[in-house]
Image (tube, grey):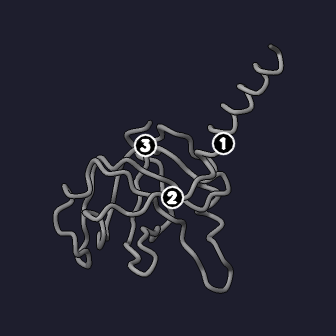
Amino acid sequence: MRMLAGLCVMLIAGICYAGEQGKPAEVPKEAAGFSGKIEGTVTNFKANGNWVAVKVTKAEPDAKSTVKDGAAVVGKEIAVKVRFDKQNGQNSEDTTFVKGLKAGDAIQLVVNYVASQNAMAMVELPKKSEAAK
């Protein structure tokens, strides 16, 4: 019986850990081409700080966005990758910020859709939303 209980605990812990290690979801088709500011709640993240998933509550497209109506992005869960520098690799400020997040945190990000990766990428250092304070 103890062994079975131990296996259940290990299985549950593995499932919780896998949520943070999983691959980010693909960008929903309604959000493909979006560029601008999003606000929302952290739903998931990768423990090494590579990406964060956000349930969008507000979206403001910028001038270069092909998605002109922010409402098309609201309500979607969008995974956003950290900035990447070809010489230095991942942006350490971004990864440090993502590592400090937890599910439920309110967040604001400026993002850009990267068509070649079907992914959203951060454009500038993210910040926790003022609404979270």
Question: Left or right: where does residue 118 sit relative to residue 1?
Answer: left
**Which badge, 2 or 3, comes first in the chain's sequence?**
2
Extreme residue toward the top, this view: 1
Question: Left or right: where does residue 19 sit relative to residue 9?
Answer: left
Label 2: few (<14), some (14–19) or many (≥20) C-alpha neighbours in 10 Å: many
**Which badge, 1 or 2, comes first in the chain's sequence?**
1
Indicate the secondary structure of the residue bearing disc 1: helix
Nearest to the observer: residue 100 or residue 48: 48
Gap in angstroms between the C-alphas marked 2 and 3: 19 Å
The amino acid type of the residue labelled 3 equals: Ala
Write down the residue under mark 2: 24
For the point 57% across and 76% down, which residue is it?
Answer: 84
For the point 71% across and 25% down, which residue is it?
Answer: 8
Question: Left or right: where does residue 23 sit relative to residue 55?
Answer: right
The quadrant where residue 79 appears: bottom left
Q: CB atoms at circles 1 and 3 under 8 Å apart?
A: no
Residue 11's place in the image compared with 110, above or below, is: above
For the point 51% across and 58% down, which residue is it?
Answer: 24
Q: Residue 65: x, y in percent?
A: 25, 74
The amino acid type of the residue labelled 2 equals: Pro
Write down the residue under mark 3: 106
Q: Residue 48: x, y in percent?
A: 67, 57
Q: Which mark is residue 17?
A: 1
The amino acid type of the residue labelled 1 equals: Tyr
**Which badge, 1 or 3, comes first in the chain's sequence?**
1
Extreme residue toward the left, this view: 69
Q: Residue 1: x, y in percent?
A: 80, 13
Indicate the secondary structure of the residue bearing disc 2: loop
